[in-house]
Image: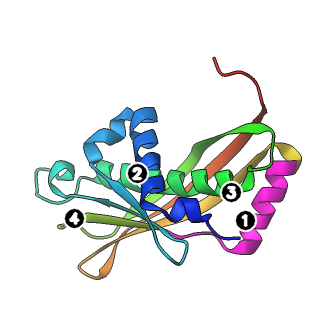
Amino acid sequence: MSFSDSFLSQEAMQKLEAMIVEEMPITKHLEFSLAAESDGKLRASAPLKPNANHMGTAFGGSLSMLATVTGWAMMHQLVQDTVEDMKRRVEVIIQEGDIEYIKPVRDNISVICERPDDDTIERFQNMLDRWGRARLDLKCKIDAAGERAVTFIGRYVALAEDEAPMK
C-alpha cells in the first residue's frame, strides 16, 4: 500500500495544512508547510523565527507541536487510504507522545515522519475494520546541522463511528 496520488499533490498538502490550522488553531503560529516525499515519508517545515525561544533556538513547545502535527497528518492520510470503502466516519487523536530533545535546533525546522511498513499498515487496517479502532506508533525526527536533534514517538488512535449526521 502506498499513498494515493492525490495525497502526493501539492494541492492535497495545502488542503491538509488548511484543515489542520482550522481544526487546531494553535498550530497557526507555527507557519508550517507539509510535503509528501517520494518514499512515503511526510515532511513538515517551519521557519525558525516565529518558533524561536529567548536563546534564538527553536522553542521546545514548537518542536513538540510540529512533530505531533506531522505524525497526526501521517495518521490522517493512512486512515483516509484505509477507510475509502468504509461507511464510517473516523477520528484521529493522539493518545501518547514521547519526545527526546538531543541538541538545539538553530535553523529552520524540518520534521520527517516515517511511514509504517506494509505489514504494520495491514494489521492497522484489519484492526480498524474489525473493532472500529486501531492505533499506530509513528516516529518523527528533526535533524540540526546534519545530526539528530529531536526524536518524537507518538501513539495515534483511529476511532470509527457509524456514519451519522454531523452536529
| Three-letter code for the amino acid on which mark 1 is drawn | Ile
Is 108 drawn above or below residue 75 in the view shown?
Answer: below
Q: Which residue is mark 2?
A: 14
Given this view, does label 2 or label 4 mark the residue nearer the observer? Answer: 2
Of the residues under marks 3 and 4, which one precedes in the sequence? Answer: 3
Say if the magenta span includes residue 116: yes
Of the residues under marks 2 and 1, which one precedes in the sequence? Answer: 2
Q: Which residue is mark 3?
A: 81
Position in image of residue 59 (x %, y %): 24, 52
| Three-letter code for the amino acid on which mark 2 is drawn | Gln
- Region in magenta: 113-129
Q: Which residue is mark 4?
A: 108
| Residue 48 located left or right of residue 118 | left
Disc 3 is placed on an element classified as helix
Q: CA distance from mark 3 to mark 4?
A: 31 Å
Viewer-proximal residue among 132 and 77: 77
| Residue 158 located left or right of residue 147 | right
Q: CA distance from mark 3 to mark 2?
A: 18 Å
The residue positioned farthest toward the left in the image shown? 55
Q: Which residue is mark 1?
A: 121
Position in image of residue 116 (x %, y %): 63, 69
Give the quadrant of residue 26: top left
Of the residues under marks 1 and 3, which one precedes in the sequence? Answer: 3
The residue positioned farthest toward the top in the image shown? 167
Viewer-proximal residue among 96 and 28: 28
Q: CA distance from mark 2 to mark 4?
A: 19 Å
How many other residues sit within 10 Å of disc 2, few (<14), some (14-19) or many (≥20)?
Answer: some
Say if the magenta span includes residue 164: no
